[in-house]
Image: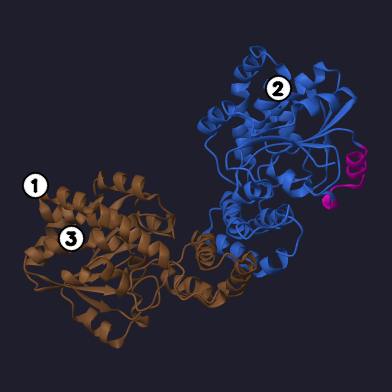
Chain colours: A brown, B blue
Amino acid sequence: MKIYPECIPCFFKQALTTLRMATPDENLHFKGLTEILKQMPELLKLPTPTHVGRVIHNLPKKIANNPDPYKEAKIRNTEQALKLYPKLKERVNNSKDRLLAAIKVAVAGNIIDFACGFNFKEDLEHTLNLDFQVLDYKEFKRELEEVDEILYLADNAGETVFDHVLIEELNKFNKKVLYAVRGVPVLNDATEEDARRASIHEVAEIINSGTDAPGAVLEYCTPEFRKLFYESKLIISKGQGNLEALSEVKAPIYFLFKVKCPGVARELGMNLGDIVFKRNAK
Amino acid sequence: MKIYPECIPCFFKQALTTLRMATPDENLHFKGLTEILKQMPELLKLPTPTHVGRVIHNLPKKIANNPDPYKEAKIRNTEQALKLYPKLKERVNNSKDRLLAAIKVAVAGNIIDFACGFNFKEDLEHTLNLDFQVLDYKEFKRELEEVDEILYLADNAGETVFDHVLIEELNKFNKKVLYAVRGVPVLNDATEEDARRASIHEVAEIINSGTDAPGAVLEYCTPEFRKLFYESKLIISKGQGNLEALSEVKAPIYFLFKVKCPGVARELGMNLGDIVFKRNAK
């Protein structure tokens, strides 16, 4: 996805959010924002917002000497989500179509997002009761039948618990799931540690994409991951960061996300708040 | 008021809002934002957010060759407000304390603000039913008794109609009102033309502050206005732009505004949405 004008104020808002998570020192907040101001004209030449996100979410870690600004928030969100797990399972158990219900649960977990801001309880309840605006479910089931393995691109910590619910359903179809996490802590995105805290290792193989961007920007992933990605027959990509990074990449990707910013809404002709399960163009 | 870190993303958001009002050409939106990116490190050395606002709201006019980007919006907002005038008067007529009711009406008009965004009907109804969080009304009435003339610093177009209601009440105390407007169109702030559209000339003398900033930054006002300002015995200052510009200036100012941004909220220890009628420190 290209960078829109509305991305520019948002980059600074996101940078400030991460600077504040990294340190209470307001001088460092100004220092970080000033550094990003200097770099921004060059950053705007990068191909996607996720490329810029990589810089604006990593710079605060260096400036504040804090390698994981969202550590506590990630643990808290995962614990909040784990408490909800029985109810999420009940939702799937009581549904007519377990797989579709689990896809809805997984997209609801996508509300946890410090880049855009969220209200855990309210946004979650609201999203669980939404209808999909784009739903390539039939096509997904057809493609699902033909594969043994699914590459699942994780997004945020806490959302991991919601992904767990979907992966359990995928396992029932005898599909192996490879759950790809970020290589280092960036934003509130899930690392291996965060995925294990949601017990993902019990239902999937956790793999490290190697990226330090808040999205699977392939050029920042390991060569091993890139090979795996291009050989994958079916990919589920969670969240806006992965969408922004991969929307132009030719691959059998199903993007599963909630529209949370005006740029993504405009790119896709959707409305803010819409939920989407969309097959990439072939 | 000083510039807070949270002002930085907001400056870009405001600039984009004005660029979009000035032209539909997205290339010019990028051009404007890129120019502001270049200037921002220097702009952050300016003393108040209103100083920066002056640059970010005037630059789009030059880039888009559009001297008054909010012209239509200002006319529309004034017409919307004029339709409400009978109801606003009724509110004052039915109140126990006409002056206080008119002050409430005037602050409710402060919701009209393209720098922060607003929903005319919803925000207005909500604000009319709010209680003041700071209300130096007794002190105001005492000071009012001692003066013949009030300098009234206008804010937005449309809000002018709400000011009209308050000025009518001030006139009942036999006070002459000088209604100070911006020197040129900037943001959606009231110029002489906008004030006349709200019939302010029938209840007050409209004077031109000469400023091209979205707030009465004295150094950008005419020498005549500055003299008048410093000789004034009682000043009513509407809105955040005037507050940000004048909060450090020693003068008998009553700031009448709604808290609409996190920076102002933090500066004053208030909450977003609060309404305030506050005497400047002596």
SS label for mark 3 = helix
Residue at 36% across / 68% down in the picture?
Answer: A189
Question: Dot 3: few (<14), some (14–19), or many (≥20) neighbours within 10 Å?
Answer: many
The verdict on a common chain for dots 1 and 2 is no
Q: Which residue is mark 2?
A: B100
Checking the image for residue A166, the label placed there is 3
The amino acid marked with disc number 3 is: Leu
For the question of whether residue A135 can be seen, the reply is no
Is A96 magenta? The answer is no
Picture quarter containing residue A54? bottom left
The answer to whether mark 1 and mark 3 are in CB contact below 8 A is no
Question: Dot 2: few (<14), some (14–19), or many (≥20) neighbours within 10 Å?
Answer: some
- The percent position of residue A6, horizontal first and vertical second, equals 50, 58
Checking the image for residue A246, the label placed there is none
Instruction: Report, in whole angstroms, how far the alpha carbon at label 3 lies from the one at label 2.
Output: 59 Å
The amino acid marked with disc number 1 is: Lys
The answer to whether mark 1 and mark 2 are in CB contact below 8 A is no
Instruction: Report, in whole angstroms, how far the alpha carbon at label 1 lies from the one at label 3.
Output: 15 Å
- The percent position of residue B99, horizontal first and vertical second, equals 73, 20
Question: Dot 1: few (<14), some (14–19), or many (≥20) neighbours within 10 Å?
Answer: few
Instruction: Tell me which segment is drawn in magenta.
Output: B219-231
Disc 1: host chain = A
Picture quarter containing residue A237? bottom left
Q: Chief secondary structure of the magenta span?
A: helix
Comparing A61 with A261, the one in front is: A61
Q: Is residue A258 left or right of residue B118?
A: left
Checking the image for residue A96, the label placed there is 1
- The percent position of residue A137, horizontal first and vertical second, equals 15, 56
Quick one: quadrant of the C terminus of chain A?
A: bottom left
SS label for mark 2 = helix
Comparing A125 with A103, the one in front is: A125
Comparing B237 with A120, the one in front is: A120
